[in-house]
Image (tube, grey):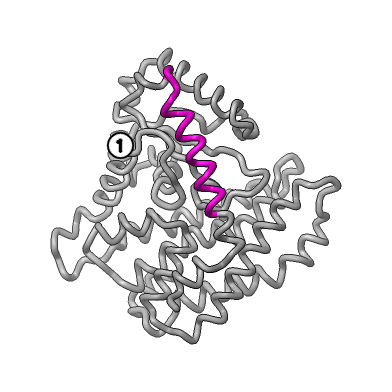
Amino acid sequence: MTFVEIFKNHKELQKRQALSTEQIKKVTTEFDTSPDLKQYNAITVYCGGSLGRGEVGKNSDLDLFILSNKRKSDEYRLDTLRLLSEIIRINSKLGFPEFSNDGQYLQVYSFPDMLTALGSPRDDNENLFTVRMLLILESKSVFNDTLYSQYIKDTLGHYFRGSRGRASFRPLFLLNDLLRYWRTVCLNYELIRDDPKKPWRKKNINLKFSRMLTVFGTVLPIIAKPTTEIEFLIDLVKCPPMERLARGLDILGDSTLEAEFRLFLSHYEKFLATKENMHKTPPISDAELDRIMREPATAFSGFLLKCLTHDNINQDFVKYLIL
């Protein structure tokens, strides 16, 4: 049995995948049938978060991101306000929680500006870096799938523009941004851990499981099978993060990792179930959360480290992850 098959035979995680697919279909239907959105053929909308990763739970919200094929300077404010108003209405109709941080990230981002700003100070200042990373790490289209697919291809093509058939090409630009994103989310956690108004416990547990998996589950197949073929990456990002990791393990071809991978899947399901229970009243105490999740979190990161430093990986890539 392949590692991908082991993942696809995990009953609880596959239930979440099925529920996520069902939820995305509902959201997509609402967007596609909205008469107020028919005029917006220059945008695509995708969801991130638990829906984008295919692991939705009872309390999951709708993390939406909007990409336009227009420059920011060419957008009309009233058109944007009408668009956002309709999206807020759809979110409310479907019964999702209100958009987080008072809708701070619910805005229209320019895809042309995103590519132009890649690597510049604007990349961080205008939140374009995060939107780009979520596009290729944990996204599912809910509106205008054709444009969404083109944006993924164009984004990955930008990272691979130096390959041009060179056998010596290495996707270090992409790897650098993936590692940069991981370090960014780690720094963001440090900013809120002492703020009593911020949900730092949830952020911390997400960091140790879903964030770590999303980044390094993508890194593994990239370094396990260095490629100059962009099609490999396009196909890879269509998969949920756990399946990407499983694909990387299949590339490594080490069957001795099977038992540990099954336990890894169980740890991840425990994390997802525990995160759902954090919404209960009274909430789980810090001490109880630490007792429940300390050992699984240690084992979870330990398995990822073992995979990323496997002897079957070119050691130049292992060195690059560190230095």
Q: Position of residue 207 (x, y in %)?
A: 60, 57
Q: Quadrant of the C terminus?
A: bottom left
Q: Is residue 125 at least partly visible in the picture?
A: no
- Name which residue type carries label 1: Leu
Majority secondary structure of the magenta segment?
helix
Q: Residue at x 13, y 63 (%)?
A: 165
In front of the other: 171 or 259:
259
Magenta part of the protein: which range? 17-36
Relative to 87, say whether 243 is above or below: below
Q: Which residue is mark 1?
A: 147
Residue 21 is inside the magenta segment: yes
Which residue is found at the position 61% from the left and 75% from the top?
A: 263
> Residue furthest toward the top?
78
Snapshot quadrant of residue 254: bottom left
Which is nearer the eye, 109 or 197?
Answer: 109
> Measured along the vertical axis of the image, is residue 284 above or below residue 103?
below
* Residue 163 x/y as whole percent: 18, 60
